[in-house]
Amino acid sequence: MLSLLTSLPGGWKRIKGYHRLNPGQTEDQGICMELPNHNITIRELQEYIKSKDYKPGLEHGYFLKLVEEIGELAEVIGKGKRLGDDSDIKGTIEEELYDVLYYVLALANLYNVDLEKSCLLKEEINNNRTDH
Ligand SMILES: [Mg+2]
């Protein structure tokens, strides 16, 4: 079933024609959102990823994908290939950094972790460290 709604609270929009339900998800949980058209927060990106890619029970699989993406990042760092003026992101450090971030946030969703809160708590510790 495709939703006709295009606007959601908080500036989110549904992606027309996009519909992918995971086992056990209701129609509402199957909404895939469009990224907001402004500088996005970690929370917004995490919610966006949850709307399109959320498979509880597959935590180990997502972790393996994260490790795979870290390997791809290591490769492109070795090659030093960067995003250029042509905006072709394939095979660049920019692409692989995003892939790593994607799976970090996807894993955070599976463990119901509010990563924005984690950032604040951990940076408070980091900023009070005296061993650096
Ligand atoms: Mg990749």
Image (spheres, helix red, strand yellow):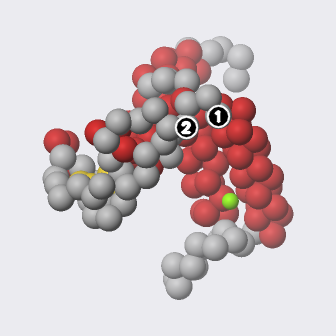
Q: Point out residue 90 in the picture as x, y percentages from the top left corner.
A: 64, 73
Counting other residues with Cα less than 10 Å from the Cα at mark 2, is it few (<14), some (14-19), or many (20 or more)? some
Examine the image and state in which quarter residue 80 appears.
bottom right
Counting other residues with Cα less than 10 Å from the Cα at mark 1, is it few (<14), some (14-19), or many (20 or more)? few
Q: Eyeballing the image, is 42 above or below 59?
A: below
Asked if the residue under mark 2 is in contact with the one under mark 1, i.e. CB atoms within 8 Å, the reply is yes
Give whichever of 22, 124 is nearer the camera.
Answer: 22
Q: Point out residue 28 in the picture as x, y percentages from the top left corner.
A: 29, 39
Give whichever of 18, 12 is nearer the camera.
Answer: 18
Q: Eyeballing the image, is 92 above or below 60?
A: below
Residue 58 is labelled as 1
Q: Point out residue 27 in the picture as x, y percentages from the top left corner.
A: 31, 41
Q: Residue at x 67, y 69 (%)?
A: 92
Q: Which amino acid type corresponds to the residue marked 1 in the rendered image?
A: Leu
Residue at mark 2: 55
| Quadrant where the C terminus is found in the figure | top right
Q: Residue at x 64, y 48 (%)?
A: 100
79 relative to 50 in the view: left or right:
right
58 relative to 39 in the view: left or right:
right
Q: Which amino acid type corresponds to the residue marked 2 in the rendered image?
A: Lys
| Quadrant where the N terminus is found in the figure | bottom left
Q: Point out residue 3 in the picture as x, y percentages from the top left corner.
A: 23, 55
Examine the image and state in which quarter residue 14 appears.
bottom left
